[in-house]
């Protein structure tokens, strides 16, 4: 007599008879499910959602924004605001990566440098990036390039938000390299430079990519928070201005724009990681 339960038999029957949805279909179902829950909350007034905006109206208004309909009083479209925010994130995260990756590799492979550098940075790491904004506004001026004013304070906050995830992940990746690999390479006559180039760096790349992915996500969080204060064109500026005018529809459109841009940025980092570490797919 079989000891399998009825639930297990039913599960096996469904898994064998129904085709498994593709990854793209699962992602689409996730979005559809989110919109469905949003509609149910709005329709039945769960948690005062009846005072919020309808998902169907939001979809129509977002399509209008994508068609070039201005979102702010100045007549700027969502593309201009998205471009300003994207440049700030790209510059801030890029500078953070340029500094954090080499520093993390040095700290992760050298006990001497770990003793010198790690305690100071570890004391700074718990400070929220947005807490640096008042100091950054005072110390870092806005730079004018032609008719465009670039608030360095916003760039600095993005840099801080992205730096520490990249830095800590790089350190952990370098620390977790198997010592047997290093000793095997050294026993075959490899120099310290060759060991770093052919053993340490490739083994650390997956951790670096993870840090970059986290850094990009925090970059979008911090840039919106910074733009809420510094003003000027940007997704955060859309959100704060619409909030002051009680325009919840524009607030939600700004939030959707941030989510879409953040998702696209993370997808680019994942694609870069797959290109840099093709062996991890096997």
Image: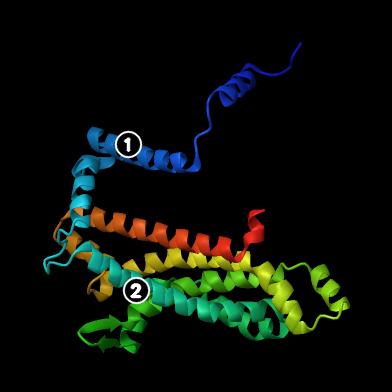
Question: Within the image, what quadrant is residue 5 found in?
Answer: top right
Local packing at callout 2 (Cα closer than 10 Å; few below 14, some 14-19, many 20+) is: few
In the image, taking residue 169 as reference, residue 224 lies left or right, namely: left
Which residue is under mark 2?
87
Using the rendered image of the protein, determine whether residue 52 is visible from the camera's viewpoint.
no
In the image, taking residue 271 as reference, residue 202 lies left or right, namely: right
The x and y percentages for residue 187 are 88, 77
**Could you say which disc has been placed on residue 36 in the image?**
1
* Badge 2 or badge 1: first in the primary sequence: 1
- From this view, report whether residue 219 is shown above or below residue 43: below
The x and y percentages for residue 151 are 29, 81
Observer-nearest of 105 and 125: 105
Query: Depth-wise, is mark 2 or mark 1 nearer the camera?
Result: 2
For numbered disc 1, what is the local secondary structure?
helix
The N terminus, quarter of image: top right
**Could you say which disc has been placed on residue 9 in the image?**
none
Using the rendered image of the protein, determine whether residue 267 is visible from the camera's viewpoint.
yes
Residue projecting furthest to the right: 187
Question: Within the image, what quadrant is residue 236 found in?
Answer: bottom left
In the image, taking residue 111 as reference, residue 236 lies left or right, namely: left
In the image, taking residue 17 as reference, residue 108 lies left or right, namely: right
Observer-nearest of 229 and 35: 35
The x and y percentages for residue 210 are 56, 63
The residue sitting at 29% across, 34% down in the picture is: 40
CA gap, disc 2 to disc 1? 33 Å
The residue sitting at 23% across, 82% down in the picture is: 148
Observer-nearest of 117 and 66: 66
Local packing at callout 1 (Cα closer than 10 Å; few below 14, some 14-19, many 20+) is: few
For numbered disc 2, what is the local secondary structure?
helix
The x and y percentages for residue 122 are 57, 76
- From this view, report whether residue 66 is shown above or below residue 218: above
The residue sitting at 63% across, 19% down in the picture is: 9
């Amino acid at each position: 007599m079989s000891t399998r339960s009825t639930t297990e038999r039913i599960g096996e029957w469904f898994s064998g008879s129904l085709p498994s949805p593709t990854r793209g279909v699962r992602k689409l179902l996730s979005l559809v499910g989110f919109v469905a829950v949003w509609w149910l909350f709005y329709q039945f007034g769960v948690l005062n959602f009846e005072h919020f905006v309808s998902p169907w109206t939001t979809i129509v208004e977002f399509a209008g924004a994508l068609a070039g309909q201005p979102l702010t009083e100045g007549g700027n479209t969502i593309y201009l605001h998205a471009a300003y925010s994207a440049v700030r994130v790209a510059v801030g995260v890029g500078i953070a990566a340029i500094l954090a990756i080499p520093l993390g590799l040095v700290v992760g492979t050298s006990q001497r440098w770990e003793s010198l550098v790690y305690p100071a940075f570890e004391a700074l790491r718990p400070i929220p990036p947005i807490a640096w904004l008042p100091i950054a506004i005072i110390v870092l001026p806005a730079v004018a390039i032609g008719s465009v004013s670039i608030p360095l304070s916003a760039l600095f906050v993005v840099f801080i938000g992205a730096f520490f995830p990249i830095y800590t992940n790089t350190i952990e990746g370098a620390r977790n390299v198997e010592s047997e690999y290093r000793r095997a390479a050294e026993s075959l006559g490899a120099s310290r430079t060759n060991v770093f180039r052919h053993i340490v760096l490739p083994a650390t790349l997956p951790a670096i990519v993870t840090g970059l992915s986290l850094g990009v996500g925090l970059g979008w969080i911090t840039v919106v928070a910074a733009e809420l204060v510094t003003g000027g064109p940007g997704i955060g500026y859309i959100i704060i201005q619409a909030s002051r005018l009680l325009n919840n529809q524009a607030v939600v459109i700004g939030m959707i724009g941030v989510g879409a841009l953040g998702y696209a940025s993370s997808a680019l980092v994942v694609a870069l990681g797959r290109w840099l570490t093709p062996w991890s797919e096997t």
